[in-house]
Amino acid sequence: MNQFSPIEGVVTSIAPIQNGSRPGCTLLLYVQTDYQETYQILVDSYTYVLDQKPIRRGDPVIVFYDLTAPAPLIYPPQYRAVAVVIRTCGEFAMLDYFDQNLRNSENTLVLNLSGCTSIQLPNGQYYQGIPGNQYMLVLYTSNTRSIPAQTTPVRVVVFCSDR
């Protein structure tokens, strides 16, 4: 089972959260999907933001949150972001565990890396190892209609951590 779930939408507002002795270290984003659903997303200093781009009102985003993390039972739903991608037109993203064959945990996507695929660490440095058996944030523009779908990603961010 995939541990991370995406929310795709547009940031409608941003507000700082005053939490204890560290005011201003957490932001509350309101994200509205194409289906007019609204989500509250907490972005803190532990959230990975692709390219460290500032998030602004009106930005199209893909937010990944941990399905196993506790969440308050409120409306609109509130989730703590693990990763945020500010989307460009026609771009898709997936955060998942990929095995040694570059197949995701649900066997729905297989990566075909090419010489044009940028493979990096979260700090922006180039990854020097062999990708696989790790959590990876994958950015791609198209995929096949096969089962599992296959794609040649534009960019891969490898999170070097144990499962």
Image: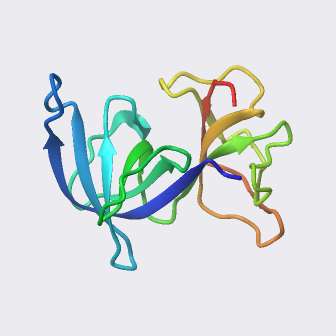
Measuring 65% from the left and 36% from the top, which residue is drawn there?
A: 135
* Residue 125 picture location, percent across and down: 53, 21
Q: Is residue 22 above or below residue 147?
A: above
Residue 127 shown left or right of residue 71 in the figure: right
Dividing the picture into quadrants, the one containing residue 51 is top left
Q: Residue furthest front?
A: 73
Residue 111 falls left or right of residue 135? right
Q: Position of residue 100 (x, y in %)?
A: 84, 36
Q: Residue at x 76, y 68 (%)?
A: 144
Q: Is residue 74 above or below residue 120?
A: below
Q: Using residue 87 as the reference point, say whether residue 91 is left or right of it.
A: right
| Image quadrant in which the C terminus is located | top right
Residue visible at 35% across and 61% down in the picture: 77
Q: Nearer the viewer, residue 17 or 153?
A: 17
Q: Where in the figure is residue 17, as x and y percent of width and height? A: 17, 40
Q: Nearer the viewer, residue 100 or 144?
A: 100
Q: Exactly how many numbered labels are in the figure? A: 0
Residue furthest out toward the bottom: 35
The residue at 56%/26% (across/down) is 121
The image's colouring method is rainbow
Q: Is residue 130 above or below residue 33?
A: above
Whether 123 is drawn above or below 50: the answer is above
Name the foreground residue: 42 vs 146: 42
From the top left corner, tell me how far across and down residue 118 is, in percent. Answer: 61, 37
Residue 143 figure quarter: bottom right
Which residue is at the front of the view, 150 or 115?
Answer: 150
